[in-house]
Amino acid sequence: MPSWKLVLATMGIGTLASICGVGVAYAMVKVPTVNQDSTEQGATVYWNDGSQMMKIGSSRTVVQLNDISKPMQQAVVAVEDRNFYHESAVSPTGITRAFLNDLKGGSTQGGSTITQQYVKNAYLNQEQTVTRKFKEIFIAVKVGKQQDKNMILQNYLNTIFFGRGANGVEAAAQAYFGEKASALTVPQAAILASQAKQPGYYDPAIKSHLQDTVNRYDIVLQAMVRSGSISQTDYLKYKDHLPKVKKLAKGNALGGQKGFLYERVKNALSGMGYSEQQIENGGLKVYTTWDKTLQSKAQQTVEADLRAHHMPRDTRVGLVTMDPTKGEVLAAYGGADFVKRQVDDAYYSTAQVGSSFKPYVLATALKKGISLKTVMNGKSPQYFNTDGDSVAAGTPGATRFINDEANAPNPYVTLVQATADSLNTVYVPLGFKAGYQDVYALAKASGLPQQGLRDGHPGEGGFFLGQSDIAPVYQASGYSTIANDGNYITPHSIRSVIEPSGKTNHPKIERHSAFSGDVAHDVQYAMQSVVTRGTGKNAAIPGREVAGKTGTTNDNVAAWFSGFTPKQLVTTIGMWRFQDRTKKHAAKTIPLQNVGGYPAINGGDLPATIWHDYMSQALSLDKYKDVTHFPPPAYVGDTSESQTPPPSVAPTPQDTPTPTCLPNQNPMTDHCKPSDNQGQPDCTLHPRNPQCQDTSPPASPTCKHIVGCESPPGGNNDGGGGQDPNARAARPIDE
C-alpha cells in the first residue's frame, strides 16, 4: 500500500499536469474566423412606400442592438442566461452538469451561456462532442474578453435560428409578426425567446401542440418576472394569452405573384452589375418602384375579369403600369402563379402588337410634316405599292389591305378619324409616305426593342400595322414616351441599392427626346378620339381624360389595349392564348375566337374592359385622384399629302359616252335642274353629260333628275311604252 505522502504527491502532480494541460490547450485554441453562414445576409427588398416586400437569399438582416426592442433583449437574457450581465462567459455549474452527464453515458448536453451559444453558432459546427465542448469553452472565454456584453448579445440575436426560415431576430420579427425587431412587444418577445430552445416548435400557428407553446411562453414570462424585466401584474396580464402571429405560408414561398416579383428584382440587380453571391448573401437593401396597392389591384382585376368572361385557362395576360414622368414600373401582372408556370407574360412573353403600333407611325408622319388634318382615303379593300399609292389589283409589287376593326361611313377621313377607327388602309400608305426606316427609328427611340422591330419586317406594309412581337413592358415604355411629351426614360423598377458599407447605387437611366412635345400633343389628341368615339370606347372612364389605342392582329392571335391619363399612369394590357408544350401536344398559339362571349376578341373588347376596370380603381387612390388634362393639339405639319375625293364625293364635270337611245329618242345634252327664273322651273345646259329625251319634250318641263333616255307617254311597239318620262332608264349613269 502506498503511503499517503505518495498518494498526495501523485495527486498533486496529476492536478498540476491537468492545470498545465488545460493552460496549454487554452493557449493553443485560437478564436477562428466567424462562420460565413452565421453572418450572411440576404437582400432585403422594399415596396415604394418603404415597407418590406421580401428577402432574397439568406433571410438574415443584421441589426444593431438599439434596433432590437428592450423586451426582446430582456426576454432572451431572462430565459437563456439570467446572469449574463454579471458572470463570466462560461457557466461552471452548467459545464459540470454536462460533464457528469457525459460520464454517465447520457446524451451530450448544453448548459451553455449566451456567449457559449453565440460561439457555437458563429465559430464552430453543431457536432455534440466533448472536444468541441472544450473548444467552445476556451473560445467563449476569449471572446468574452474581446467583446463587451452588449456586442455579444447583439451578435447572438443576429445569428440564432428562430424557425419559419428566419435567421436572426429581424427576420424572425417579420416572419412571425410582420414587424421590425425594434417594435416587438413583451408577448411577441416571449414567443421569439421561446424558439431559442427548439426553433419553430413553439409556434402559436401550429395547433397540434399549442399547449406546449403556451407552457413555454409562460415560462419565459416567469423568467422575466424573476429578472425584474416585467412586474407580477404584467405577468398575470400576459399569462396564457398568446400574441397573434402571421399565418404559416402554404406551399412554395414563390407562389402567386411573389415569384414573378422575386425574379424581376433579381434580374434588375443583375443588370446593375451585382453577382449572384452579392444578391443572395451580400446584405443589400433594395428600394424598388413597385407599388403594393397597384400590384394587388392588377392581380385582382385581371383574374376577376377572366373569370367573369369564362376565359379558358390557356388565356395569357400581360399587364404593366408605369409612371411616364419617371420611367418607373409600378405594377405588372405576368400570370396567376409563378410556381405553376414560370413564364412572366408581362416581361418576357411577346406577341404581335397589332394596331397599337399605329401611334408610332402617326408620330413619324407628324414629325415629317404630315398634319392631323390630312385627308386620306380609308376605303377597304385597297392595294398599295411601297410608295404608299393605291393601285389596281394585280399591280406588280402591290399588297392588298383591309380594315379589320372598323370602316368609316365616309372613307375620306382625317388622320384623327383614321386613328379613332384604326383604318389600316390609311395607316399603310401613311407609313410608306413617312418612311419605314423613320418609323423604325422613332419606335426604337420610344422604347421598343430593336430585335422585335426587326422581326416585324420593316419595309412591308404589315410593319405599320404591328406585326412586330413585343413584350408588354416595352409597349408600356413606348406609350410612356408618348405620354411624357416625346421624352423617353429607361423603364426601371429599382430606385436605389444600399450596400452594408453604406454605399448607395442607382440604376443607369437613359433620357432622350424621341420626338417633340408638339408632335406628342397631336398624337395624344388623336389617341383620345379612340376612347371617346372610336374602337376603344370600352376603356372610357367618366370624368377622366384618356388617350389610348386598341390592337387587333390577323386571325385574332392577340389583342391589346394601351392607354394613359395625362401625366399620371400608363397601362398596357396584352392578351393571347398559348398552350405550353406537354407530353401530349406541342406548344401552340390559339386564336381569340369564340371565347369569352365574343365571336372574336379585338383590342377594344376584353383588353379595353380590363384596362377600364383596373385603371378606374387605380385612379381612385388619393395620389391619382386629381383630374388632369391633356394639352390642345399643336396641328404640326401641312395637308399636302391629302387625297382628292372621287366625283361621288365632290363631282368634277367630265365628258361621258353618249348613250344609245331607242328609235324615237334623242340624246339629251341638257337636262333639268331646279332654278329660279321668275318663279318658273327652267333647264340648265350640261353639255358634258349627254342623255336621251323624246323628240317632243313638254313645253314646260318638270325639273327632276333625268338620268337616261326618255320616251313619250303611251309608248309604242318599240319597247319603251309604259315608262314614266322621268324614270331611270335600264342603263343608268352616275350623276
Image (tube, grey):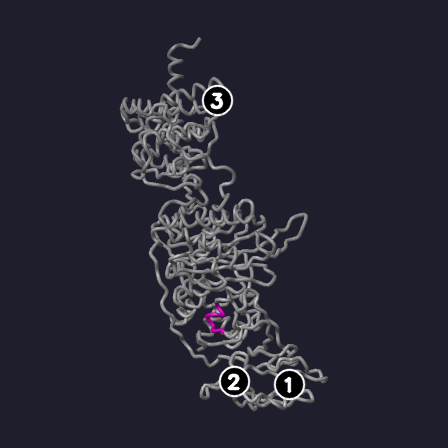
State how far apart marks 2 and 3 are (Cα): 120 Å
Q: Residue furthest right?
A: 717
Q: Residue furthest front?
A: 714
Residue labelled with disc 1: 712
Whether residue 23 is visible here, answered yes or no, is no
Residue closest to the eye, 715 or 539:
715
Depth-wise, is mark 1 or mark 3 nearer the camera?
Answer: 1
In the foreground, 45 or 226: 45
Highlighted range, magenta: 413-419
- Asked if 640 appears above or below 221 in the picture, the reply is below
Q: With respect to residue 509, does 729 lie above or below?
A: below
Give coordinates of residue 363: x percent, y percent.
45, 71
SS label for mark 2: loop
Q: Is residue 385 visible?
A: yes
User: Which percent across, then down, holds residue 648?
Assistant: 55, 79
Q: Quadrant of the N terminus?
A: top left
Report the residue marked by disc 2: 673
Residue carrying label 3: 107
Query: What amino acid is found at the position of numbered circle 2 in the picture?
Result: Lys
